[in-house]
């Protein structure tokens, strides 16, 4: 990946709806080479997809929490079962496996505190292998969906 590919990625992170013509102008390439580089970046997996970024409040999901998960055991079967089960919970927006304690960090969004409590009690606490859940509420987003640095 060279500097021109990184410029293409930077522009697309800023505005994923750019046409190839607009993108080519911004990175100072003609359309054909820009299009070729774009397809190469997609094929190689540097660009994983395109999507709309939706405001959670606009769809009634203005309550967000971070949930720290500690597993009872960390054997391969427990980890696999937990990861498959957590991936099936629609309100879990992100899930990261961590080094050390706790084992996982989940970012969840719900309509309100009551909906979060229901999700917590009926889904999250019942995930396979869970020993302990600890939650903290998100007050505000200071840095959100920042493009990757060049």
Image: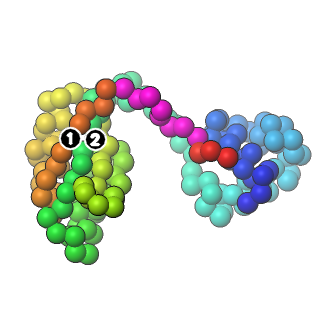
Q: Is residue 10 visible?
A: yes
Q: CA distance from mark 2 to mark 1?
A: 6 Å
Tell me residue 44's x, y (percent).
Answer: 65, 64
Q: Residue at x 87, y 45 (%)?
A: 29
The answer to whether 15 appears left or right of 70 in the picture is right
Q: Residue at x 18, y 61 (%)?
A: 71
The answer to whether 13 appears left or right of 67 in the picture is right
Image quadrant in which the N terminus is located = bottom right
Which residue of the protein is positioned furthest toward the right in this rendering?
Answer: 30
The answer to whether 56 appears left or right of 5 in the picture is left
Give the vertical position of 93 relative to 47 (above or below): above
Q: Secondary structure at mark 2?
A: strand
Quarter where residue 101 is shown: bottom left
Quarter where residue 109 is shown: top left
Q: Which badge, 2 or 1, comes first in the chain's sequence? A: 2
Is residue 42 a member of the stretch shown in magenta? no
Are the residues flagged by discs 2 and 1 in contact, CB closer than 8 Å?
Answer: yes
Which residue of the protein is positioned furthest toward the bottom in this rendering?
Answer: 76
Q: Which residue is mark 2?
A: 66
Q: Residue at x 80, y 37 (%)?
A: 26
Q: Residues within 10 Å of mark 2 (few under 14, many from 20)?
A: some
Give the vertical position of 59 relative to 134 (above or below): above
Between 18 and 70, the one nearer to me in the picture: 70
Label of residue 28 in the image: none
Q: Residues within 10 Å of mark 1 (few under 14, many from 20)?
A: some
Between 9 and 143, the one nearer to me in the picture: 143
Q: Which residue is mark 1?
A: 135
Residue extent of the magenta highlight: 140-147
Magenta span main SS: loop
């Amino acid at each position: 990946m060279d500097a021109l590919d990184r410029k293409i990625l930077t522009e697309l992170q800023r505005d994923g709806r750019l046409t190839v013509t607009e993108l080519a102008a911004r990175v100072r390439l003609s359309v054909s080479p820009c299009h070729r580089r774009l397809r190469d970046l997609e094929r190689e997996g540097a660009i994983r997809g395109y999507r709309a970024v939706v405001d959670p409040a606009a769809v009634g999901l203005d309550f967000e929490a971070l949930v720290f998960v500690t597993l009872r055991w960390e054997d391969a079967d427990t980890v696999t079962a937990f990861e498959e089960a957590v991936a099936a919970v629609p309100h879990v927006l992100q899930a990261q496996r961590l080094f050390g304690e706790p084992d996982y960090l989940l970012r969840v969004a719900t309509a309100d505190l009551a909906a979060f409590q229901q999700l917590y009690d009926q889904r999250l606490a019942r995930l396979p292998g869970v020993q302990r859940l600890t939650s903290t509420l998100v007050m505000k987003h200071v840095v959100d969906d920042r493009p990757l640095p060049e």
